[in-house]
Image: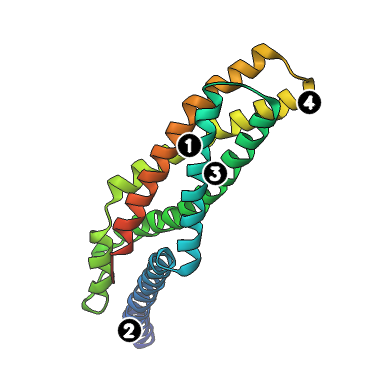
Amino acid sequence: MGSWCSSTRKFSLTDEDNRPDEISQESQKLEALGDKLQRSITGLNSEEFDRNHQTLTRLIQELNELESVHKTTVSSSGLDLTGAAVRDASLSMDKMIEHLSTIYDTVNELQQKEKLYSAQNKGILRTVKSVNMKRMDKTLQVHEKLKGQIDTLLQNISHYKITGQNETKAKEIKSETLKLIPQMRKTADHIQETVNEVKHVQK
């Protein structure tokens, strides 16, 4: 009997001793996620990110100029230039979205752990609550929709170049392009507004 009681008490003490370790592990996870979030926010303020934004601004301006050209004429060379500008602008937006997507996913994960926050990591909680998730969610959805339209346009331009110059197809691509450019301009502005807002979120 004495042996059984001793074993039981030993198990109980071991179980209790493990709890601080579990709490410590959860705290470490929160800190790691908090650091990941802060790194992504810091990335939005980096010189590299600013250069990418300047590139996107320049490409959108090029698309504005190409838009006026497409309104008056359609040519194979014009479609080539437009396709290249659309592709490059899309890549620039993708880089910006990559940061925002990481921030969105990290904040979402941190929100699920809100009840586990201790006094030591309340700073992370303040950062999480400062991020406008509704705006970010809308930005990511708008970009995803635009991305699909861009891929379709680039495929159509590529197919047009392979199969030969078909006037009807060229007009269809022209119509797609004239619809897409304003959407790209609007999406780029929306992304930048979201970026500017998140840039000022601090831990």
Q: Residues within 10 Å of mark 4 (few under 14, many from 20)?
A: few
Residue 151 x/y as whole percent? 59, 34
**Is label 1 or label 2 in front?**
1
Q: How crowded is mark 3: few (under 14 residues within 10 Å), some or many (20 or more)?
A: many
In-image side of 177 versus 184 (left or right): right
Q: How crowded is mark 1: few (under 14 residues within 10 Å), some or many (20 or more)?
A: some
- Residue 162: image tag: 4
Residue 34 x/y as whole percent? 36, 70
Q: Residue at x 74, y 19 (%)?
A: 165
- Residue identified by numbered label 1: 64
Q: What residue type is labelled 4?
A: Ile
Q: Which of marks 4 and 1 is nearer the N terminus?
A: 1
In this rendering, is residue 104 above or below 75? below
Q: Are marks 3 and 1 in contact (CB under 8 Å)?
A: no
Q: Are marks 4 and 1 in contact (CB under 8 Å)?
A: no
Q: Which of marks 4 and 2 is nearer the N terminus?
A: 2
Q: Which amino acid does label 1 sit on?
A: Asn
- Residue 90: image tag: 3
Q: What whole-number distance in Å separates the C-alpha atoms at marks 1 and 2?
A: 71 Å
Residue 85 x/y as whole percent? 59, 41
At mark 2, the secondary structure is helix
In this rendering, is residue 174 above or below 185? above
Q: How crowded is mark 2: few (under 14 residues within 10 Å), some or many (20 or more)?
A: few
- Residue identified by numbered label 2: 13
Q: What residue type is labelled 3?
A: Ser
Image quarter of residue 131: bottom left
- Residue 186: image tag: none
Q: What whole-number distance in Å separates the C-alpha atoms at marks 4 and 3?
A: 22 Å
Q: Are marks 4 and 3 in contact (CB under 8 Å)?
A: no
